Image: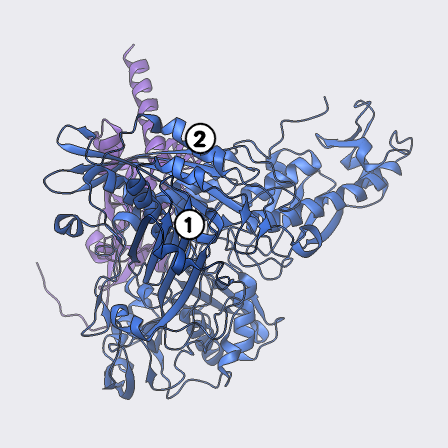
Chain colours: A purple, B blue
Amino acid sequence: MTLRTLAPDDKIGITISLNGRPVQVEVDTATTLLDLLRNHLALTGTKKGCDHGQCGACTVLIDGERMNSCLKLAVMMDGREITTIEGLAEGDELHPMQRAFIERDAFQCGYCTPGQICSAVALVEEGHAHSREQIRELMSGNICRCGAYPNIVDAIEDVMAERRGQFREAAE
Amino acid sequence: MLSNDPHVGSPRSRVDGPAKVTGRASYAAEFKATGLTHGYILSSAIPRGRIRAFDLAAALAVPGVLQIFTHENRPQTAWFASSYRDQVAPPGKPLRPLYDAEIQHSDQPIALVVASTFEAARDAASLIGVTYERAPHETDLERARHDSYEPPKKRSGIAPPPDPKGDATAAFGGAPIKVSAEYSLATEHHNPMELHGTTVVWESGGKITVHDKTQGTLNTQGYVTSVFGLSSDDVRVVSPFVGGGFGSALRPHHQLFLAVMASLVLERSVRVEMTRTQMFSHVHRPQTINTVAISADPDGHILSLQHNAVAATSRYEDYQENVVNWSGMLYHSEATQLGYELAKLDIPTPGDMRAPGAPTGLFALESAMDELAHATGIDPIELRLRNYTERDENDDKPLTSKELRACYAEGAARFGWSRRKMTPRSMRAGKELVGWGMASGVWEAMMMKSSARATLGRDGRLEIACAASDIGTGTYTILSQIGADALGLELDAVTVKLGDSSLPMAPIQGGSWTAASSGSAVTLTCRSLCETLLKHAKAVEGSPLTEAAIEDVAFNGGMIRLRREPDRAVSITDALAAAGLDQIEAEETASPGLIAPMRRASYTHSAVFAEVHVDEQLDIVRVTRVVSAIAAGRILNPKTARSQIIGGVVWGIGMALHEETMTDHRFGRFMNSNLGEYHVPVNADIDGIEVIFVEEHDDKVNPIGVKGLGEIGVVGTAAAIANAIHHATGKRIRSLPITVDKLLAA
């Protein structure tokens, strides 16, 4: 491992997989993943709500896991696979969670929504939530100031039920 | 076929949903601009005093820093404080950012670093040295309340307390049953998820486009032109999406001033976004202390009602809201005395926060009513019915409608209120005490002047345009529904453009009046468009409509049809083609003065029922169930309407149990200015919430019979929860939020 001293405006090159596409970018060592996405890569779907890991608005999927992108330095993302809200839909075909959020009116102002949806997608994958109470607990890292919580839980339950249905069909 | 299912009144998904769930909706700090620079605000570390000197050397040496603005080098702006007053400013002298060396509150903006990157600006701001000259400060309302005063200048639009009726003091003295206590509310901060931010795009020719987090693009435009001496042709404000407002984005905030200032000086595009901590440096719900005294006869009939409040404000403005007047609207009393005073603190000016004043005052009134119910042994609903009034007793005016009785009845039935045992601590579930409480809510149903434009194309597509904002309330959707029904179109044939100062005038989005105001404007505009369309349809060769008046035709499925013979019709396309037009346009203005006579008062009402479970050993409170029954006139979209009320209830739960901005009075600073320590409800805190809209027909309130829903959901909720906690525990906590320490100490 070679160490090198950085000047204040030195940048470091990283390569990430972003929504399925390789992206090479030079980053300031002080740049967070959130600011990289919003300010440098023009992907503003990921939101800044607190910049302190307290609200969840900046939630993205890093190697499939939900993470607060404001707590990750961009330089640490070299080689990682990152999915943002912009990467969930397949063309015009919305992700089931996106459709469920619209159907259940699981948002109002829409600002926490990308983070909620990314978090919810990972929650379903994690497979730990089996009841409304568990969904509520495991979605509590994402604040919604409009108070759409009951509708968010409804949307997630819908997607979980849909998935169970698909598994059953596949098994039969 | 004559009629489609009307869109208005039916549940419809948000038309802006796809943009919001895919991240395509752009908020103020997300607009792009070539050569965009980034500003970072430095905030004052002291609450009161003066800046003696800045040391900028280290900050200026940071690569990428373009300029640091302070009061010493800021450009010339308007001299008079009055030029900084916006549409909703209270009496006083608004804060003029970077105006001089004076510090008026903690975290006041004192410098702006502008750099080519956000990282450089943030880094440089941390390197600025500031020498202060401190002055003594006061941030404690408990001390300042002794110097309270009646605001000498009243805030426009806020009715001061009415003159006393009867002799409430004497009536109280001689009454058989009395309750009297002090009820207080902590300082609360709005904390919309979107930070307050502004992107100023420097256009050629010195014009600027301002993307501001605002609930009123015209208010922002007016402020910028007035402060910087610009013409309204040079300033366009475009804010199509707002990441939550709740009142926090009614007035222009300092990030707007700073971004515009920097852009004008540097002749470049500039973005300034507050940090979450800086979101505690401006508007908030004021800490307020209520005193309520009610006396009654043994049957619970109110003999006297006194409600007085002292609320915090800043040194430089007299912010006022309606805290006590609600007490003269909900119940009948022959002797009523209401009073409202302010006390000055070294804090930023408070402001409107979701239902400003109403949950503050109603927590006091509705807790006192619960205490009266307890003292008389009368069921809380029955007590309210015995004192029901059909008039606004403050102005002795009749009401356009009031279905509060139906709210009590339907809410109680859904909640199962009849199974409530009267005695506190008499209901349990395992280790937990169970409490059932209720409260009433009331909010004004207002309408403001608004315009709208509607453009119908030959292809049958309708565009509606209005400067109003959609802060998440569903305005895009309800205006689409109104437009679609007026022209008989599918929802996806309608596009609504909002949040742009260049569009027809609309009021700021606040006060729950947007549906009534802009909804009425769109209704009138579409009516006018239909008339033009019929005129053109009549001119089509062989038109079956030549003799038809507007009442004789229906607009449906892209056709103008005779109601009596629906098969006889002219299509929109043919009508416009015959006239040689690609599109037709109408623009109309709806004004309350012309439409709703001011002889009657209009309010929305609610009855809120709450169930709490309280751990008997630990006093931890969980709100397990809320039923909110709402009377708000016509419901345009039951789906988005329900969400509005659920959101209001969540706010009420936050107010009851969580939200409190705490001050360290030694330093005159807030201690918990972040979302980790300023607690707002999270998903785990929110259980079952049921919303009921009772039938309420109101043809007097405004042309479309709606009363607004943004505020009523929060109004009675905290009181209902506080009453439920008393029912569960026998402990009456009279200061919000009701935290574990207060319950343990009671």
Residue A85 visible in rendering = no
Chain of the residue under the numbered disc 1 shown in the image: B
- Evaluate if marks 1 and 2 touch, with contact meaning CB atoms under 8 Å apart: no
Left or right of B537 on screen, residue B722: left
Left or right, B479 with reference to B2: left
User: Which one is closest to the eye, mark 1 or mark 2?
Assistant: 1
Chain letter belonging to callout 2: B
Residue B270 at x, y = what percent?
Answer: 43, 70
Mark 1 / mark 2, whichever is N-terminal:
1
Depth check: B215 or A157 in front?
Answer: B215
Q: Residue at x 61, y 53 (%)?
A: B466
Q: Is residue A98 visible?
A: yes
| Residue at left offset 72%, top offset 21% | B1
Q: Which residue is mark 1?
A: B303
Dot 1 falls on a residue whose secondary structure is: strand
Q: Mark 2 highlights which residue?
A: B409
